[in-house]
Image (spheres, rainbow, N blue to C red):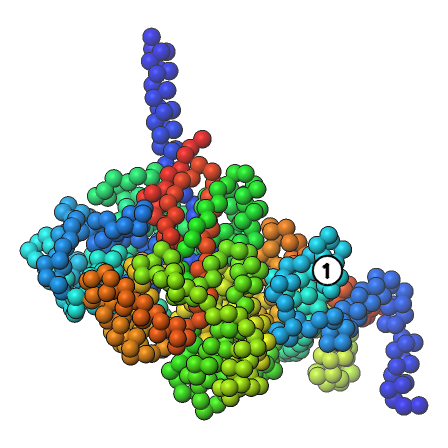
Amino acid sequence: MTRRLQSKLLAIALAAACGMAQAVTLRVADVGDVQSMDPHSLNETLQLSFTGNIYEALVARGKDMKLVPALATQWKQTSPTVWRFELRKGVKFHDGTPFTVDDVVFSFKRGSAEGSDMKGYTAPIKEVRPVGDTAVDIETNAPFPILPDTLTSLYIMSRKWCEENKAERPVDRRKGVENTASFKTNGTGPYRLKERQPSTRTVIVRNFGYWDKVEGNVDEVVFTPIGNDATRVAALLSGEIDVMEPVPLQDVDRVKSAGKFTVLQGPELRTIFLGMDQKRDELLSSSVKGKNPFKDKRVRQAFYQAIDIEAIKSRVMRGAATPTALMIGPGVRGFQADMNKRLPHDVEAAKKLLADAGYAGGFEVGMNCPNDRYVNDAQICQAVAANLARIGVKVNLQAETKNTYFPKILRRDTSFYLLGWTPSTTDAHDAMYNLMATPTDKGQGQFNLGAYSNPKFDELMARVQSEIDQVKRNDAIREAFKIHLDDIGHIPLHQQALAWAMKSGVSLVQLPDNRLFFKWVSVKSK
Amino acid sequence: MSVSAGALRRFFDGDVWHSFRSTPMAIAAAAVAFALVFCALFAGWVAPHNPFDLATLELSDARLPPAWSADGSRKYLLGTDDQGRDILSALMFGARISLLVGVLSVLLSVVAGVALGLLSGFAGGKTDAFIMRVCDVMLSFPSILIALLIDGVGRAMFPNAHDTLAFAVLVFAIALPGWVQYARTVRGSTLVERNKEYVQAARVTGVSSLRIMRRHVLPNVLGPVLVLATIQVATAILTEATLSFLGVGVPPTQPSLGTLIRVGNDFLFSGEWWITIFPGLMLVLIALSVNLLGDWLRDALNPRLR
């Protein structure tokens, strides 16, 4: 009898032990590190994707990219310029402080403060007013029909926590300013930060006080940046990590053939393009003195037509890219399929254009390029440099790691650069507003680093921003795109394809904006 | 008979030449090193293509396997890399940059390190303490950090620096953190030698300190330095590759050997082995031949083995 009891107890203990051992850890590797834990410090996909597990916005996106309630339960327009957001009740920050109206007002202020990279999202907003204890009114400067779409990346922080930690101002990546919010977090999301070692290891664990049910079963996520492609693939193959992103294009077949992994490839919303400084009277780095060759449309067109995009697609990208003529790809609202026709690759025409502009012998220009941000970014730049050499343009290419690249180009210390952009609102307006509109100090054109400027485009952009009628809005988008195409404001290259790899047994949701939310990740134990 | 011819005659009659001729390993190493240096120096004439001339690159020829493989092209003996560069030519051109950076920076740090180490060990006292504390400070920073710092300062001072100046900055940036090791090694050996009888004898006969250091102590402490220096050449080449990755070295359109190796790293698993293997092999050959030569030279110059 006693023996039986003993064995029963033992069985129960064992079961309990097994249950405890089942705490699921997901080890994730990415090519680069999250730059900071401060959700307002950098408007970049990886940054927003990772901090989006810790912090939440008023509105979120579901698996189908449709808007779903997050910290706001519902929203409606009370007048053309005013939106009311009802806040979720009973939500607590990770430190136990309840989530209040105050935090929302504070976070919007923080997002628009000096040093914030979120100004693009806050600029259309005139005021955020509390309505009682459970709602806020957001008033925009002009009618702004896609306001909820733009709020999905503006994460809410705790006012009390920020004040206590002297983190009321966002971390400014451009100036290298850091504060507590870079290293510690206090959000409302399904995960909270356990350990942060910049460039080495970041660990987040489940927040069991989360207001929503979590679909996945991951208790702990260990995030490691592994910059070297081969090392990252080796880590996956040897079982050191469970999920990695991106799979280097040259290794997709290798990973697939190992049999124990799934490679998830899908179209990405990101568009890769080249930008040219069209503002300075003399380029920062060029052999042309006293004038700026990029101010001449013929030079920009010559650059455009000199680039052999098909060769880049087949050779550099191994087919995993869709060449584009537009600054947005299919999948973004406002994409115009019929306008997506590139100027032909034509070296002779390019040479002639350059000669017509007065640069028959070509010239020298410096080019900036990241080497660990986008798929084969430095290789694309090298191919572009080789293409341009054919028309006599000597490119002095500087390819560097994104930690030094982004601060540099965001200071606009560049003449010719490569950038990728995912419209986080999945709407054409986002790309128009951030990349193509004339830069202002309010946040418009914050990523228009070459300062392309056409007043007519700006006018149309403003119309797109406030037009409610979808047909008229689409017409304005078309007209604006046409202007940008005719001006050759930028040189669009392609939309890259996403490639993630994971161990068999891991199921996750690959969003086309390249975000990975751990609440949707499940690991099947064997 | 002119002086130099006399010196040459003395060299060929001397121990060093004799030891060289009787060491097959040294002859082999010297032959390989000579071939590599020759190819690197005269890459412009020897190499079948000029990979630095971007206008001649054909992206459609990218990632072709070596000529003897089924898909290979006779145009590219060792295949092409991801930009369509002929690997054989890229190796020759790249080795030129890497060898120059490696040899110059090591030379610079050897000269500085040996001089300071000798002085430190021989003078002792406050001079010794000062130099060694500077060494400690230098050692407490990772060398790549110092290199970055110098490169940053160099670029800030000469913002419009063109290739040659940028190159000088690069050499200096790699050389500066390097001298510490030589200084410490030489100091250690000098401390030992200083108290030996032959030094004391020289002192008693009234030889000046400078001459004692140069003629008597230096040859006796040079052994470990030569070994260290030959290893450092390979390290310097890789440091240059790291700096290039961080965006402060040579531009990716003019890849050095180090850059080629780093690029090759990405292709380790892809099956395109030629992009990885050949640059690595080249570095191994350089490092090995220089090392073997260094070993031999150490033995040949060691007064105790004569």
Question: In the image, residue A187 lies at what x, y percent?
Answer: 25, 53
Q: In the image, what residue occupies the spot 23% across and 70% down?
A: A463
**Is A278 positioned to the left or the right of B81 in the image?**
left
Q: Nearer the viewer, residue A184 or A102?
A: A102
Question: In the image, residue A329 lies at what x, y percent?
Answer: 39, 60
Question: In the image, residue B46 lies at what x, y percent?
Answer: 77, 73
Could you tell me if residue B189 is visible in this image?
A: no
**Is A305 positioned to the left or the right of B189 in the image?**
left
- The number of discs equals 1
State which quarter of the image contains the C terminus of chain B: bottom right
Question: In the image, residue B38 lies at what x, y percent?
Answer: 78, 73
**Is A296 positioned to the left or the right of A55 in the image?**
right
Instruction: Name the subunit of mark 1.
Output: B
Q: Secondary structure at mark 1?
A: loop
Q: In the image, what residue occupies the spot 87% across and 63% down?
A: B23
Amino acid type indicated by mark 1: Ser
Q: Nearer the viewer, residue A334 or B282?
A: A334
Q: In the image, what residue occupies the spot 30% across and 53% down?
A: A52
Circle 1 Cα neighbour tier, 10 Å, few/some/many (<14 / 14–19 / ≥20): some
Find the residue positioned furthest to the left: A132
Above or below residue B193? Residue A72 is above
Above or below residue A387? Residue B164 is below
Q: Nearer the viewer, residue B212 or A508?
A: A508
Residue on which the image places disc 1: B73
Could you tell me if residue A306 is visible in this image?
A: yes
Q: Quadrant of residue A333?
A: bottom left
**Is A147 positioned to the left or the right of B24 in the image?**
left
State which quarter of the image contains the N terminus of chain B: bottom right
Q: In the image, what residue occupies the spot 32% across and 55% down?
A: A51
Q: Quadrant of residue A39?
A: bottom left
